[in-house]
Amino acid sequence: MELTKVAAFLAGAALIDKLPEAELNEVIEPMADALELDAKKLLPLVESEFKKLEAMDDDKFHPYFVEQGKGLDYDDAAAIFQCCIQITLANGELCKAEAETLMAFAEVLNIDHADALLFVADIVKDDPELDVSFDDE
């Protein structure tokens, strides 16, 4: 699994969740463990990607993630997507903009909509206090 591709998606999920950069470490470390990656190598890459994405024009996001999704096998893509879900839900809520971003990530990771929905449902079912909002933020 290519660390830079993983870092891009994890940083993207953290950015859409409006996770403060200072909190990246506590969120990324368990994701590195879940992906069986070295957190000490992954975290600096996520921090770098986070800064890059913050400065990126909105119209460049989709093409950037299309490029990052290329070459990933389904199992790696699914694992990355599930980590993105976890990061997106770290604040205890799921809003429309976050859901749209997750579906866009699923698309560029070549995860079909049914699988993406089931991955989200599987994670959401374990958090009965999750706040779901149809608002954009």
Image (cartoon, grey):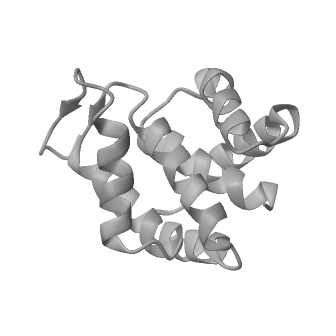
Q: Nearer the viewer, residue 10 or 49?
A: 10
Q: Residue at x 30, y 37 (%)?
A: 124
- The relative height of residue 136 versus residue 130 in the rendered view (above or below) is below
Q: Residue at x 23, y 40 (%)?
A: 137
Q: Nearer the viewer, residue 118 or 108?
A: 118
Q: Residue at x 72, y 37 (%)?
A: 32
Q: Residue at x 54, y 50 (%)?
A: 12
Q: Nearer the viewer, residue 114 or 64?
A: 114
Query: Which quadrant is home to the N terminus?
Result: bottom right
Horizontally, is 15 left or right of 118 in the view? Answer: right
Residue 84: percent from left, percent from top? 51, 47
Residue 115: percent from left, percent from top? 37, 65
Horizontally, is 24 left or right of 71 in the view? Answer: left
Residue 62: percent from left, percent from top? 49, 72
Residue 117: percent from left, percent from top? 30, 59
**Residue 6 placement: quadrant:** bottom right
**Residue 31 placement: quadrant:** top right
- The relative height of residue 5 versus residue 98 in the rendered view (above or below) is below
Residue 54 appears in the figure: no
Q: Nearer the viewer, residue 132 or 14?
A: 132
Residue 126 appears in the figure: yes
- The relative height of residue 22 versus residue 17 in the rendered view (above or below) is above
Total labels drawn:
0
Horizontally, is 22 left or right of 111 in the view? Answer: right
